[in-house]
Image: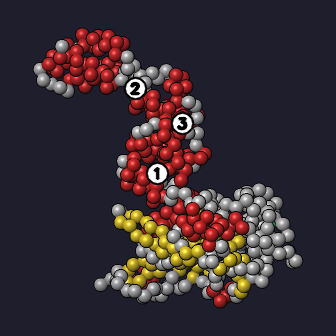
Amino acid sequence: MATAYEAVIGLEVHVELKTNTKIFCSCTTEFGGDPNTHVCPGCLGFPGTLPVMNKKAVEYAVRAGLALNCAINPYSRFDRKNYFYPDLPTAYQISQYFHPICKEGYVEIELGGKKKKIRINRIHLEEDAGKLLHSGSSITSSQYSMADYNRASVPLIEIVSEPDMRSPEEARAYLEKLRAILEYTGVSDVKMEQGSLRCDANISLRPVGSTEFGTKTEIKNMNSFRSLQRALEYEIDRQQDVLEEGGTIIQETRGWDEEKGITSSMRSKEEATDYRYFPDPNLPPIVLDPAWIKTIKASLPELPDARKERLVKECGLSEYDAGIITSSRSLAEFFDRTVVLFNEPKTVANWMMGEYLRLLNAEGLEVSESKVTPEKLAALLKLQADGKISGKMAKVVFEELFNTGKEPETIVKEKGMVQISDTGALEEIVMKVLAANPQSVADYQAGKEKAIGFLVGQVMKETKGQANPGIVNQLLKKKLSE
Ligand SMILES: [Zn+2]
């Protein structure tokens, strides 16, 4: 009988902190810029320069740790992780190995209505490396490579989970939740496509029921939630095939190839001892004042779970809708601001979950980049609620609003989209339609209630779709019973 395996997954997530300047010098952390323009002798590793700790980076690390339910270590320290690679000008990365700034937190995920806590082992502060631009497709197949040190020494936190995830879906849910929490706290802009949120995964298989860990591989180069899930699914199949054929898993680092949809071996996995960690002699330990930690804790915003609960309890949204709306702070704030202006939370949620997210996803836009504002959405919903436009028209107006940012009222005027809700005007048309369709009238009066649908359709046709169908229905029923 074939052995059933279960996956054991842990994630290491690197998050760039949104400080204005780098972690140990005053260079800007701004994304982009011409190569090697955001650099100084410090972050280029020139001899004789000394690092100076950026206090904001420490504050953000603590803030992230508190939001992720971690204990904050009152004493932490920097160590050098030694390795040679051209993107690292000093040939060592300043990191925290022996005494990280945060430990023992957790993130709660929910899948199929089931909640699960994924434990966080530690969070440490470190500096980012530069970026290599290869003339070919990889460093080994290139004629030459260029080094851009703009990103060197940008502050990072590395969030290391326990191996608590058992499926690619759980890993994805964890990363999504982590991103949402970090976005809420404002410590990072958490953009996977720009590399401010990066994720590596450790994965092994073991027979179901076993409590021991199998040999793990580390997967790199996953640049989206989807690629994380796909890479893990692939790796589970690959490891299972190896095990079923009686082979052994090699502990190694494997790269995910998005196009080919496979992982392939990059290098054998290094051990911590390979890095010769030792305390950085140029940086004093970080000793935190408990009062400062308290101040940071008090400044944390309402986090996704609390916000979701509020939307379910106070606004009557379903768990599902509330979960999606609170999955990003910008979406949740958009919702709150719209509801203040148009106090029908369910209608607002329906529009956001439907048309708005559909168009945002189709265009690959963030809420902050969209031309739709809470004021404009509320104005549109009000036009519909007042019967000035139909639901169908509202969708057309919304799309135009999304594309142009024009005021809904302007769009309605430009398109000549006025819904006729004026009973007097409609009554005349209704009488005309009734006179022209005696058979339908007779059918209705003989008990065939369906006949009214045809009559409504005729009125809509007469008014080129501009009649308010609700009012037409009422008027027809009234006239037919007279
Ligand atoms: Zn610098």
Q: Is label 3 in contact with label 2 (beta carbons under 8 Å)?
A: no
Type of amino acid at the residue the image marks with label 2: Gly
Local crowd size for mark 3, using a 10 Å CA cut-off: few (<14), some (14–19), many (≥20): some
Give me the residue at 65% from left, 89% from top: 273
Q: Which residue is mark 3?
A: 375
Relative image position of residue 54 (x, y in whole percent): 74, 68
Q: Which residue is mark 2?
A: 387
Local crowd size for mark 2, using a 10 Å CA cut-off: few (<14), some (14–19), many (≥20): many
Name above or below for residue 54 compared with residue 273. above
Type of amino acid at the residue the image marks with label 1: Ile
Q: Is label 3 in contact with label 1 (beta carbons under 8 Å)?
A: no
Give the structural element (helix, strand or loop) at label 2: loop
335 and 315: which is toward the camera: 315
CA separation in Å, label 3 and label 1:
18 Å
Image-based side of 131 in relation to 117, left or right: right
| Residue at the outermost front position | 291
Give the structural element (helix, strand or loop) at label 1: helix
